[in-house]
Amino acid sequence: MSNLWQKCLDYLKNDIGIEETEYAIWLLPLHADISDSEIKLYSPNRFTLKQVTDKYLPQIIDFCRKNKNDLQFNVRLMLGDIPKKEPVREVVSNTASNDADELEKKLKTSTNLGDQNQKNNSKNGLVNYYSFDNFVKGTTNQLAWYAASNVAANLGKPEANPLFLYGSTGLGKTHLMHAIGNKALEKDPNIKVLYIRAESYMQSMVKAYHSNSLNNFKNIHRSLDLFLIDDIHFLSGKSGTQDEFFHNFNTLIENNKQIVICSDRSHHEITNIDKHLTSRFAGGQSYNIDPPDIETRTAILLKKAQESNFELSHEIALYIAQRIQTNVRELNGALNNIVAYYNLHAGKYENGITLDGVKIAIKDQLAQHSKIVSIDNIKKVVCSHFNIKLRDLEGSSRKKNFVVPRHFAISLCRDLTNKTYKEIGDSFGRDHASVINSCNRASEMCAESEESKQLYDELSRTISY
Ligand code: ADP
Ligand code: MG
């Protein structure tokens, strides 16, 4: 972050006295791009942009002009992120990748963490890199690991068919799916395996339909020995694809062919999917993966560093793991940034990266994570967006103006914090069932309307960044 913007932030916080949470929610996520004549502040979404414009823009302009001693100095608020200028920056900004596919693409182009073994087999969709060996086990993921490795060794056993893995993003579900595929193929290279995300499954089905090759599509997917289908929650509301998947599923199970399914929530929390189908998901074994604990986070960092031949001390790994607690993808992002920073400044750190170097390399990530997402923050952002009072959000009025924000706020608490249904219920004066109902209502709204989905996603980004 540049000096001018840092000074401006200090001024807003210390001299203007902007409250800590407001500061963290609205100002910290801004990225500054500064030239001689102007500062462009990039905002991650339009809510932040609007809040900053309404609340703080005059003070920001005032400060920058005084500081630069230039009354023409421009302050511009922009949507999005700073455009990348030099290729090397692309590696630096390799923070959170969205999924294994994206990671795969990045791994192919990235110079610092590249690995010859990380190839994608375009025929079966598997990424060779993901294995059981390079998956770090801890208390929150070891059951899923054991179940997955058992399935890989014994495909199609009825007691574990389907294998259903669920949990929030970045916790290794996709990694385990690929590991199953790779292991099973290692054991028997002649089996037919397919890894596919539910979204791509739907797209290829639609394509087959339009090119009159639906029978071919069905034959391919119904003759597999191992079918790994990822992010199944995507089928929510897509009834045509659900029908085909249902038949696909039944054919494979009847023939003792293995199915592995991943989702961001448990089968009874998935809405807008035919109950016949979701109840089938529970017919084998189901495992939840929770965010890793501190020991596992540290071990993951050390393992990833070792894989990249990057020297990382236990002390530094622990420092990062203490601060980045959300998921493994974020940990990888932090490590990528550190490696890239180190490569750019290698001369400065002859004896390996120091703690001070790490603090600079992942400054932005640390700033984001210093604001732990709390139920109170979520309530605040939701009230501020819908322009309603906290007592109405928490109250019992059934007016639509209050009910929608309430469902959204409760569902966001479930998605973005580690709180249990009971804890969330207590903080809204509601019981467990009512919290589940709100989460389901919010997902239904998002499945029914693109606008609601966008709104939900933007609120979610506003809160977490
Ligand atoms: P999910 O499918 O749950 O969103 P991914 O499987 O895509 O998450 O994992 C995100 C990244 O984190 C991947 O690069 C994956 O290899 C890595 N990862 C997740 N959990 C572990 C773990 N326990 N050990 C090693 N790497 C992990
Ligand atoms: Mg995934």
Image (spheres, grey):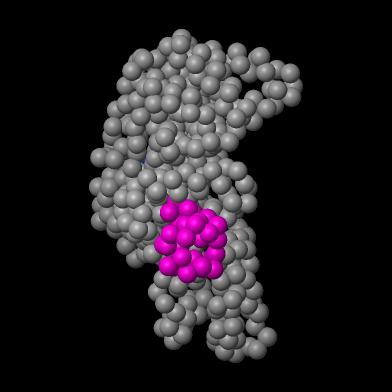
- Magenta region includes residue 94: no
Tell me which image quadrant ligand 1 sits in: top left
Q: Is residue 156 above or below residue 210?
A: above
Residue toward you, 36 or 457: 457
Given residues 406 and 277, the one toward you in this image is: 406
Residue 408 colored in magenta in the image:
yes
> Does residue 310 sit above or below 4 in this rendering?
above
Q: In the rendered structure, which segment of residues is drawn in magenta? A: 383-412
The majority secondary structure of the magenta stretch comes to helix
Identify the image quadrant of residue 63: bottom right
Q: How many marks?
A: 0
Q: Nearer the viewer, residue 247 or 59?
A: 247
- The residue at the point 42 percent across, 67 percent down is 391
Quadrant hosting residue 62: bottom right
Residue at the image position 68 percent from the left and 85 percent from the top: 72
* Residue 187 or residue 312, whichever sits in front: 187
Q: What is the x, y in percent for residue 426?
A: 32, 56
Identify whether 264 is placed above or below 401.
above
Against 69, residue 246 (above or below) is above
Residue at 43% over, 59% down: 396
Name, please, the residue furthest toward the right. Answer: 211
Q: Is residue 312 visible?
A: no
Residue 62 visible here = yes
Q: Position of residue 410 (x, y in %)?
A: 43, 54
Image location (x, y in percent) of residue 398: 49, 57
Residue 216, horizontal then vertical, whole percent:
65, 15
